[in-house]
Amino acid sequence: MTIAHRRAPGRCPRLRLVLLSALLIGGALPGCVPVATHADRVALPLFDAHTHLNGDMTAETLIEWMDRAGVRKMALMPRHYSDDGRATDEQAAAYAAKYPDRFVAFIGGQRGDLWNSRAWTTDSHFLSQAEAKLRTGRYGGLGEFILHHYGYNRLVPTTHQHISGDIELPADSPLMFEIADLAARFDVPVVLHAEAESQTAAQMRRLLERSPRTRIVWAHNCGRGPAAQVAAFLRAHPNLMCDLGQMAVPLVNPYGYGTGWPAGRSRHISIVQYRGGDVASDMRDLFEAFPDRFTIGTDTAHPFQYPRYGDVIEGFRVLLSKLQPETARRIGSDNAERLFGTRDPRTKHGVRPGLATSG
């Protein structure tokens, strides 16, 4: 199949601005990367299924960033941390109630009471609080729960820099099992951050085997594992979805999980999209083999990142341009519609939530 391309508006900024950007950030001068017509903002309004809410961000500001980038809907995962987070679940629910066609509210998993490893082996107030909130019908998911994470606190001045931010909690803990059971009872997905190194991958396998009716979203391309490992997980567990949170690489001044950060700390990290826009061939084959099992997400976790929001979305449009149009539409929008039980009113696509059947 021949894929048609056109240069999206704004794709090739004026040379003076490009040169200034290159000088300021010390990066290479970017080329003009075409976006396929099936992946541009006219043909494909996107669903950002993995991003975060901070306390000082208004709904209207978020919508402004979304509209600039051609994003139709966003999943809001509150960051309760006392750094630059300070969001609440109620804030996310209020935004989703005011703008139901733009936001899906989560009960946030990034909270101080879950930072301590003892919380994952003993009774937690989180469960009773989360159940009460789910009973209101105002929330569409749980997470993101940070289980195995490489910290970047000392690189970001708005976080708590006296700690590294590294986290290593078991994915098969008693609390995680109970969270999975709670999600299954209320038919909402659970989003987990767990780098797919061997021990963590084994824990994730036990969680998935124990919780076959829970829709589990394993963030960052299933823990940034190699394509063969991700495919094996998807074949074995029809309740598993992978989000591509921040796995697209911005064309200008690349940053984020998709670049392979942190270099040298782990051998398991696999690249989805190279700098310059090309998609790794094994990952492209993975997406085509399991077109119903992936969603996109910017993973915009801090307020200072929002000026780069459109850059990350552009990276995703370039990534989706490398896929067949039907695959791009599913990954860019439809799978998230199915996951959250929402619908794009302009199309026939978007169905009730259920377990995946592809692959």
Image (cartoon, grey):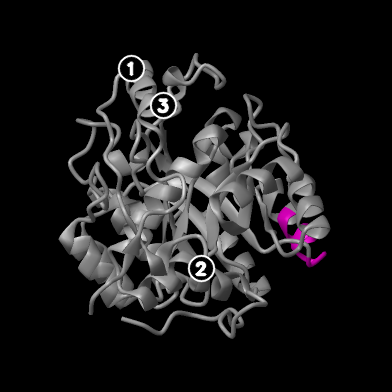
Amino acid at circle 2 = Ser
Give coordinates of residue 87: x percent, y percent.
Answer: 71, 37
Rendered position, 347 above or below 124: below
Q: Quadrant of residue 183?
A: bottom right
| Category of crowding for the residue at label 2, using alpha-carbon neighbours closer than 10 angstroms: few (below 14), some (14–19), many (at least 20) | many
| Category of crowding for the residue at label 1, using alpha-carbon neighbours closer than 10 angstroms: few (below 14), some (14–19), many (at least 20) | few
> Mark 1 = which residue?
23
> Mark 2 = which residue?
333
Mark seen at residue 239: none
**Is 134 inside the magenta-drawn segment?**
yes
Rendered position, 71 above or below 168: below
**Is 131 inside the magenta-drawn segment?**
yes
Residue 218 visible in the displayed image: yes
State the CA–CA distance, disc 1 to disc 2: 36 Å
Element on which disc 2 rests: helix
Give coordinates of residue 61: x percent, y percent.
Answer: 71, 40
Q: Nearer the viewer, residue 359 or 65?
A: 65
State the CA–CA distance, disc 3 to disc 2: 32 Å
The image quadrant where one finds the C terminus is bottom left
Rendered position, 329 above or below 230: below
> Mark 3 = which residue?
17
Q: Quadrant of residue 227?
A: bottom left
Give coordinates of residue 98: x percent, y percent.
Answer: 83, 56
Q: Nearer the viewer, residue 33 or 114?
A: 33
Q: Nearer the viewer, mark 1 or mark 2?
A: 1
Specify start and end residues of the magenta stretch as a single range. 130-137
Element on which disc 3 rests: helix
